[in-house]
Image: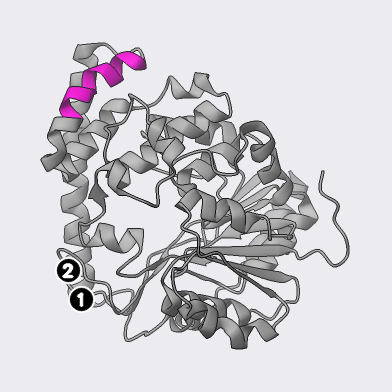
């Protein structure tokens, strides 16, 4: 058990980064605008140049910023693992270097800490696209924008166990309301439990879903809030940006940011190539294996993963289709049921793609829920804060109502 003192930060925001100085400096500036001395910002820089090192120097006068430069090439998991060593807060959250945070996060974490909550998860109805982002279909029509979707402010208390099963049944294609370390915050001692059990904080090929699934095994009291506490950013050279441009794909062996041990341990349940669906799916498989939850792993939806791969990446069919029936057998699914499920999810994926395309075209055409001409994540977060204030939103009111309702119950 970690010792907590009066000087311990309430929240550590950890930013592992590499060769994206312009995004990272803006992200740190945005975080420093949060008026709280209980915030710690950890920047772990694995760049092969000095750009971020030089640019961030004026910000290091603020004692809340911890900066470390390690120029030895690290894989993505190692960068996250090493960054975690410097996080001293009671709660920890991880950000991409192009992401932002709503300043109300400190109120949410303080409320959770007082109630003994283990993890705070939030939805992401606000998303920022950097000016350099080019979509495959929409080109630059969403570049430099903050897009806003509907949210309710509702506070709920999901079961981590149920959410782990839901995630496995989706084939790792949905977070659901899992406790999250990325776009969510978790008590540091819960993270330490993952490390003690598995030897890593992130037992998988990428930190996103591997971290969520693993920590869910040790979280007892999570809360989920339908509110934009986090602002996912999407820049051209991020994973999300490459996905938007249809460049988030390739041979596993050609991705230097993937940990070698995770690539070597790649399961038979997931097609063996790098893409969004395969990485998330393998995150679930490896994390569940590491924490010893084979019972949940038996619920893993292999046909859905393969269907998604065929719909999104048909050029990789030689690695996808031959793997389908062996993967089904691995989880106890017969060939007829496996093929039927594959066909269903293949159609479902195409329908979802068409629906998303139509909705996005309608949004772009009508300009509904879009704030434009935002040059940095700082401006994106400021735009979100202004929108919330103008619309009369106050997270503190929803948290208070939730506390009163639970107390009455």
Given residues 227 and 121, the one toward you in this image is 121
Residue 133: horizontal and vertical position, in percent?
Answer: 27, 72
Image quadrant where residue 4 sits: bottom right
How far is disc 1 from disc 2 in space, using C-alphas?
6 Å
In the rendered image, the vertical position of residue 55 relative to residue 403, given as above or below:
below
Residue 155 in view (yes/no): no
Mark 2, Cα crowd under 10 Å, few <14 / some 14-19 / many 20+, is some
Residue drawn 62% across the image and 49% down it: 223
Main secondary structure found in the magenta portion: helix
The residue tagged with tag 1: helix, strand or loop?
loop
Looking at the image, what colour scheme do you see?
A: one colour
Residue 78: horizontal and vertical position, in percent?
Answer: 53, 50
In the rendered image, the vertical position of residue 51 relative to residue 265, given as above or below:
below
Residue drawn 60% across the image and 72% down it: 394
Label drawn at residue 252: none
Residue 157: horizontal and vertical position, in percent?
Answer: 62, 44
Determine if the magenta segment contains residue 39: no
Magenta highlight range: 320-331
Q: Label 2, on which residue? A: 138
Task: List the single residue furthest toward the front.
Answer: 72
Q: Is there a contact, CB below 8 Å, between mark 1 and mark 2?
A: yes
Specify whether 253 is left or right of 137: right
Looking at the figure, which quarter contains the N terminus? top right
Residue 95 in view (yes/no): yes
Label drawn at residue 141: 1
The residue tagged with tag 2: helix, strand or loop?
loop
């Amino acid at each position: 058990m970690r010792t907590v003192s009066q000087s311990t930060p309430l929240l550590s925001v950890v930013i592992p980064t590499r060769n994206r100085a312009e995004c990272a400096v803006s992200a740190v500036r945005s975080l420093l605008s949060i008026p709280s001395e209980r915030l710690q910002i950890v920047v772990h820089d694995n760049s092969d140049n000095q750009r971020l090192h030089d640019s961030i120097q004026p910000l290091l006068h603020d004692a809340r910023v911890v900066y470390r430069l390690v120029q030895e090439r690290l894989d993505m998991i190692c960068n996250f693992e090493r960054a975690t060593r410097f996080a001293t807060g009671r709660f920890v959250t991880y950000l991409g270097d192009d992401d932002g945070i709503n300043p109300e996060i400190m109120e949410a974490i303080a409320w959770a800490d007082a109630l003994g909550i283990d993890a705070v998860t939030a939805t992401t109805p606000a998303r920022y696209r950097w000016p350099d982002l080019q979509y495959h279909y929409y080109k630059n029509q969403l570049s430099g924008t903050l897009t806003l979707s509907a949210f309710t402010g509702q506070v709920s208390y999901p079961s981590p166990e149920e959410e782990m099963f839901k995630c496995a049944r989706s084939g790792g294609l949905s977070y659901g309301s899992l406790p999250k370390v990325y776009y969510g915050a978790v008590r540091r001692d819960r993270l330490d439990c993952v490390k003690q059990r598995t030897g890593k904080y992130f037992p998988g090929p990428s930190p996103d879903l591997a971290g969520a699934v693993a920590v869910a095994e040790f979280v007892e009291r999570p809360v989920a809030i339908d509110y934009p506490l986090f602002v996912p950013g999407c820049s051209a050279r991020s994973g999300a940006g490459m996905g938007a441009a249809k460049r988030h794909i390739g041979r596993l062996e050609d991705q230097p940011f993937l940990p070698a041990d995770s690539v070597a341990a790649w399961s038979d349940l997931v097609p063996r190539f790098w893409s969004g669906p395969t990485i998330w799916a393998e995150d679930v498989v490896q994390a569940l294996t590491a924490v010893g939850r084979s019972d949940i792993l038996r619920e893993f939806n292999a046909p859905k993963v393969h269907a998604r791969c065929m719909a999104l990446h048909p050029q990789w069919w030689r690695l996808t289709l031959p793997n389908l029936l062996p993967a089904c057998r691995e989880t106890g699914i017969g060939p007829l049921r496996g093929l039927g499920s594959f066909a269903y999810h293949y159609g479902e994926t195409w329908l979802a793609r068409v629906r998303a395309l139509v909705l996005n075209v309608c949004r772009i055409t009508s300009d509904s829920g879009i704030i434009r001409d935002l040059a940095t994540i700082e401006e994106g977060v400021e735009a979100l804060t202004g929108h919330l204030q103008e619309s009369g939103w106050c997270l503190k009111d929803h948290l208070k109502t939730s506390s009163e309702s639970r107390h009455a119950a």
